[in-house]
Amino acid sequence: SALPFFGTTTRLLFTFSCVFLAITCVVTFVVAREKQHRLTAEQLVVNRPFRDLPKALWESIKRMPVSMRRVCVVQFFTWLAYFTFFIYMQGWMTQNVFEGKTAANGGTPAEAQRFKEGSSAGSLGLALQAVVTFFVAGILPRACRLFGTRLVYCVCLIVLAIDLEHFLCEELL
């Protein structure tokens, strides 16, 4: 390996992803400027009947600034990928992290035990993620009002990059 400190290609790519995430967060924080977008009373969907919701959403999308529409498209596909990640995460944990295999798939008893441990760890990870998301969802709107969306977004992504890098360094030790 050209960079033996990282051990595997996966760890190398993981580190580059963390560094890239941190750099893009800092650049976004420095360069991006927020512009307040206010709706008029007739643009609000709140007072319309439920049957008019699809039409109102379509009208809102058409009136949306182009840059915001692009963000919405990216967010839509990101959510598709994110929920696909949820579906396959536990299997990935059992096979790649714990190197487990079920007895039905020709695994040894040791591999079956690792499969069981990986399955439990994957379930615990998803459960902890749900709990953390629940609490952060209550805090995030208040933090955005106090500090601004841009600062909160950048701080969250930098914390994520630090956390991912901490996980990688912990694995290397």
Image: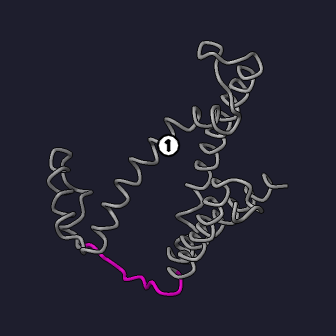
- As helix, strand or loop, the secondary structure at mark 1 comes to helix
Q: Position of residue 126 (x, y in %)?
A: 61, 39
Question: Does residue 38 show up magenta in the picture?
Answer: yes
For the stretch drawn in magenta, the main secondary structure is loop
Q: Where is residue 141 in the image (x, y as percent from the top left)?
A: 52, 64
Q: Nearer the viewer, residue 20 or 65?
A: 20
Residue at the image position 73 percent from the left and 60 percent from the top:
6
**Which range of residues does the magenta coloring cover?**
29-39
Q: How many marks?
A: 1
- The x, y position of residue 160, in whole percent, is 63, 62
Q: For mark 1, what is the residue?
A: 85
Tell me the quarter of the picture where residue 139 sits. bottom right
Q: Which residue lies furthest to the front in this view?
A: 1
Quarter that holds the N terminus: bottom right
Specify whether 69 is left or right of 52: right
Residue occupying image coordinates x 27% and y 57%: 46
- Who's the residue at 56% across and 38% down the image? 89
